[in-house]
Image (cartoon, rainbow, N blue to C red):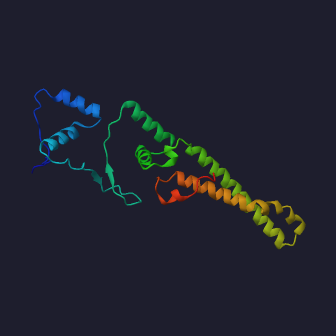
Amino acid sequence: MNTRNPDFITVDLRGLKAALVSCAQVRRESVSVLVRRAVARELGQSESAPQLVVDTGGLGASHVPRVKLSIRLTTPEAKRLAVGAHTAQMSRDAYLAGLITGVPALTTGASRTAEIVEIIKSNAKLSSLSRNIHTLSRLLAQGKLQQARVHRDLLDTLDGDVRRHLAQAAALMADLCPRGSSTETIPRSSR
């Protein structure tokens, strides 16, 4: 049984290997890509699109096929990728995909952690409002109007507090979505 790829060939470069490898490194691409391009050009054909290896086993929750991709980075670039992914608390592939799709939380330099801390604080405040409204409702139901008046200020600021929280939550969600998605229409000036 022939297990070799029929498109794979071996070529004697007769002393050209060092120059070929050097040229590929300068262009930051593989030797195979460089050779395919040169052969296609020599044959007067357009270079075909690169073949992607589809991983059908790891479709994940979104059922979108994933592909294995090999990239070449300098050592400092690879370190920055690893540090960025670690800082964002993401895998390197998810972090790189977020950078490629333009997720604002990854591309604007804004601190995703700081935004999450702010939304947690806002959630706590909203939770407190919920308890206070419940208390106010109970006092009114019991006819304790004097005690219920203490909570009047709560009603005066309730609308603004809820709107601020929702705007902050929407802005955080927009920052976590790729640019150009439907959430991009959310106004970001209300942060």
Q: Whole-percent x and y of residue 111?
A: 56, 42
- Write down the quadrant of residue 136 in the picture: bottom right
Q: Is residue 142 visible?
A: yes
Front residue (pair 71, 20): 20
**Quick one: which residue is furthest to the front in this view?**
44
Q: Can residue 151 be seen in this view?
A: no
Apparent side of residue 62 relative to residue 187 in the rendered image (left or right): left
Residue in the picture at 51% in, 52% down: 176
**Quick one: which residue is furthest to the right in this view?**
146
Front residue (pair 22, 10): 22
Residue in the picture at 87% in, 72% down: 143
Q: Whole-percent x and y of residue 129?
A: 73, 60
- Write down the quadrant of residue 134 in the picture: bottom right
Looking at the image, how many numbered discs can be counted on the residues?
Answer: 0
Front residue (pair 21, 3): 21
Q: Whole-percent x and y of residue 9?
A: 12, 41
Apparent side of residue 175 relative to residue 96 in the rendered image (left or right): right
Apparent side of residue 90 relative to residue 166 in the rendered image (left or right): left
For residue 104, above or below residue 35:
below
For residue 170, above or below residue 72:
below
Q: Whole-percent x and y of residue 40?
A: 16, 44
